[in-house]
């Protein structure tokens, strides 16, 4: 069996720089990082890596919008080049970012496997009926990390409703996700689509305690997915007209607190609109009238710099402005 992919020590240093990870959380890959990753400080280490990744690498689908050849390649080395080496501020969607993150974690000595989720219809940007919830096919990448015999659900690429910290696989436990009031939980339960009584983990979010829970996705217990599985999912996500990634510009970048201890907000671009929300309050809300306005906002708000050929790539598409 071929070994799982890893990155070099130099690449790990580059990744630390890319996510602006503070010095106290930087551990040399190898025996030093493995001792931390598998010990009592492993959860703190993992939490910092997730938090700073979310705050510095955007969740985005621009390869399917601003590109001449609209191809998404999830080879770990190609992903590293795109997200880290090129220094253009780029990120990716779930199959890209959670793949990249899994290789980083494996290199640092974390014990993990990748699984897949069925995204809920309520999580789609164009959802118009949150009451009529159904699950779509497997099309989301999730990592399950084990630290001292406790399994954690880890996801760095699900947009504004995604988790901001590792979540232990405990059914019904409520976690503050983004202050002041956004909460998330995992439930181990059946879903109506299944004819069997097999249970799955269901990830849910609500904006505040008095609001109803909104189902985001579900994923199986103890089922590992392999690179070939994600290649198939990636092809569907990147090419199907039923995938909103193919017809809408979508970018999300989380915002860290000043002390770096928690995620406190997010900047979101959907189509021709953008907003920034911090501590539950919108600070910016704009609608773009031209492509130049949107491209300028990508650089100013998200740190994404598009080249001239990339800017031209959206011309003639339904997602272009003007």
Image: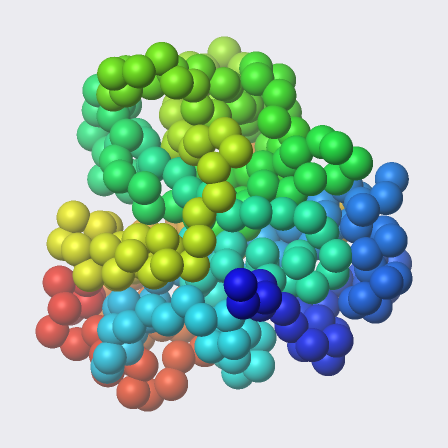
Residue 276 appears anywhere in the view: no
Residue 64 is situated, as x and y percent measured from the top left of the image, at 27, 67
Q: How is the image coloured?
A: rainbow
Residue 88 is situated, as x and y percent measured from the top left of the image, at 50, 78
The residue at 69%/64% (across/down) is 107
267 vs 17, nearest the viewer? 17
- Residue 9, picture quadrant: bottom right
Residue 161 appears anywhere in the view: yes
On the picture, is 80 further left or further right than 38? Answer: left
- Residue 117, picture quadrant: top left
On the picture, is 204 further left or further right than 72? Answer: right
Quadrant the C terminus occupies: bottom left
Q: Is residue 134 above or below residue 48?
A: above
The residue at 39%/25% (across/down) is 215
277 vs 142, nearest the viewer? 142
On the picture, is 47 further left or further right than 35? Answer: left
Residue 273 is situated, as x and y percent measured from the top left of the image, at 31, 53
9 vs 94, nearest the viewer? 9
Q: Is residue 127 above or below residue 31?
A: above
Q: Residue furthest front?
A: 1
Residue 228 is situated, as x and y percent measured from the top left of the image, at 37, 59
The residue at 26%/68% (across/down) is 65
The residue at 37%/71% (across/down) is 73
């Amino acid at each position: 069996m071929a070994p799982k992919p890893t990155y070099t020590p130099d690449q790990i240093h580059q990744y630390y720089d890319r996510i602006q990870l503070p010095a106290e959380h930087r551990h040399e890959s190898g025996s030093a990082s493995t001792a931390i990753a598998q010990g009592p400080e492993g959860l703190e280490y993992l939490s910092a890596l997730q938090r700073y990744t979310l705050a510095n690498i955007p969740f985005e689908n621009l390869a399917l919008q601003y590109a001449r050849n609209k191809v998404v390649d999830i080879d770990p080395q190609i992903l590293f080049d795109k997200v880290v080496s090129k220094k253009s501020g780029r990120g990716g969607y779930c199959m890209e970012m959670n793949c990249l993150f899994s290789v980083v974690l494996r290199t640092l000595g974390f014990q993990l496997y990748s699984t897949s989720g069925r995204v809920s219809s309520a999580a789609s940007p164009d959802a118009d009926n949150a009451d009529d919830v159904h699950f779509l096919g497997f099309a989301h990448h999730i990592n399950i990390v084990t630290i001292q015999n406790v399994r954690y659900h880890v996801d760095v690429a699900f947009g504004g409703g995604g988790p901001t910290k590792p979540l232990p696989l405990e059914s019904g436990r409520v976690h503050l996700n983004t202050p002041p009031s956004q909460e998330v939980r995992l439930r181990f339960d059946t879903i109506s689509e299944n004819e069997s009584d097999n249970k799955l983990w269901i990830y849910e979010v609500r904006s505040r305690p008095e609001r109803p829970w909104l189902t985001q996705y579900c994923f199986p217990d103890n089922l590992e997915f392999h690179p070939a599985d994600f290649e198939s999912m990636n092809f569907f996500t990147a090419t199907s007209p039923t995938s909103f990634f193919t017809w809408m510009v979508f970018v999300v970048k989380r915002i860290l607190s000043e002390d770096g201890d928690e995620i406190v907000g997010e900047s979101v671009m959907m189509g021709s609109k953008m907003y920034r929300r911090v501590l539950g309050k919108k600070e910016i809300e704009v609608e773009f009238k031209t492509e130049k306005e949107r491209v300028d906002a990508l650089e100013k708000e998200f740190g994404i710099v598009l080249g001239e050929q990339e800017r031209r790539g959206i011309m003639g598409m339904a997602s272009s402005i003007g």
